[in-house]
Image (spheres, helix red, strand yellow):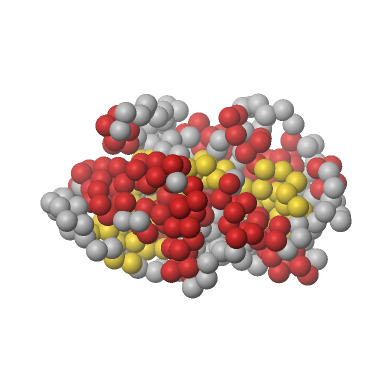
Amino acid sequence: MPATRTTLRRSIAAAAALPLLAVALTACGYGSEAKKDDKVAPAAKGEKLSADTVKVGYFQNLTHATALVGDQEGLIQKELGGTTLKSTTFNAGPSEIEALNAGSIDIGFIGPSPSINGYTKSKGKNLRIIGGSASGGVKLVVNPDKIKTLDDVKGKKIATPQLGNTQDVAFLNWIAEKGWKVDAQSGKGDVSVVRTENKVAPDAYKSGSIDGAWVPEPTASKLVSEGAKVLLDESTLWPDKKFVITNIIVSQKFLKDHPDVVEAVLRGSVKTNAWINANPDKAKASANAKLKELTGKALAPEVIDPAWKSIQFTDDPLAATLQTEADHAVKAGLLKEPDLAGIYDLTLLNKVLGAEGKPPVADASLGVK
């Protein structure tokens, strides 16, 4: 398939108009239940900002490595000075959005699907996307004994994490581009789309109940460690091989009341991404150390090494790809045409980038006026 902006844009299913999908949407996490794990970082020396504490949420996932590393290395806390960073981890996008709405967190690292869902459900009143974090890290991996070419996917059982989540709609869109037919709700058709939690996918693959999966990292590399083969990296379907997988959101109330704190977190995020990109091996080890602290188990080298290579860490939220993903959710029949005007406020991010001597990023005409 030629990688054009109009035909190969990936989709998002942030189904604000469909109650069924409201509980299904995740960024790329493991399961539909939230697992909170509060950690309070020791306050750095320095002047306290306008809030005593800032509560930040993220996933125990490599595509959230900006938060993992920024927390582990103290890079975000350093920018906050005397304001204390309190981190909470989640396994699912909807739960993180609920926490943001309830004030349990102020800022979140989260995927595009729940971001759109949260914004549209609240009619644009509960959150803003204020920065980028990661791109890529999604692959189609298959049983090489059953599937040798992309055309061989037809007639097979392929897992996606959940009905309507980011990868689910990306796969549905790819199927449509192939000219095949699948009922989005049931997953039945020329390909059997089997909604399977990421944490369950390796066992499902080993048992033969699925022939492959369109999944984020590190699930894709876990499947490869079980004998699967990478058939397609989703990034190859995008212009410049970039698409949003994780961005940074903030409660609109917190943004209004504590812009200095939000700016400090963004400054920490920008400096963390710079450190990750300058020190990839150290950053990988740091992310794995944080995962071990949070989950009790580090990722094996055969899993984390290929997974890490497929993720790009970026300050740019890649706003145009968010709109593209929403368009494909509409095309799949999983989302009514959303009004995303005002979902971005990149003012503080561009201020931080300017201070670092970096160019500003664009909001694809979806920013606050």
Does the rendering let one see residue 200?
Answer: yes
Which residue occupies the foreground of this view, 67 or 108? 67
**What residue is shown at x 86% (from left), y 56% (from top)?**
145
Query: Relative to 170, is 144 on the left or the right?
Result: right
Query: Relative to 261, is 337 on the left or the right?
Result: right
Which residue occupies the foreground of this view, 184 or 221? 221
Does the rendering let one see residue 190?
Answer: no
Q: Quadrant of residue 331?
A: top right
Q: Is residue 40 above or below residue 314?
A: below
Q: Which residue extends farthest bottom?
A: 296
**What residue is shown at x 45% (from left), y 46% (from top)?**
279
State the quadrant of the C terminus: top left
State the quadrant of the N terminus: top right
Query: Relative to 365, is 206 on the left or the right?
Result: right
**What residue is shown at x 65% (from left), y 67% (from top)?**
200
Q: Which residue extends farthest left?
A: 47
Which residue occupies the foreground of this view, 344 or 86? 86
Which residue occupies the foreground of this view, 228 or 26? 228
Q: Is residue 348 above or below residue 30?
A: above
Q: Position of residue 360 (x, y in %)?
A: 36, 28
Q: Position of residue 153 (x, y in %)?
A: 81, 48
Q: Position of residue 49 (x, y in %)?
A: 16, 50
Q: Position of residue 276 (x, y in %)?
A: 44, 46
**What residue is shown at x 71% (from left), y 57% (from top)?**
224
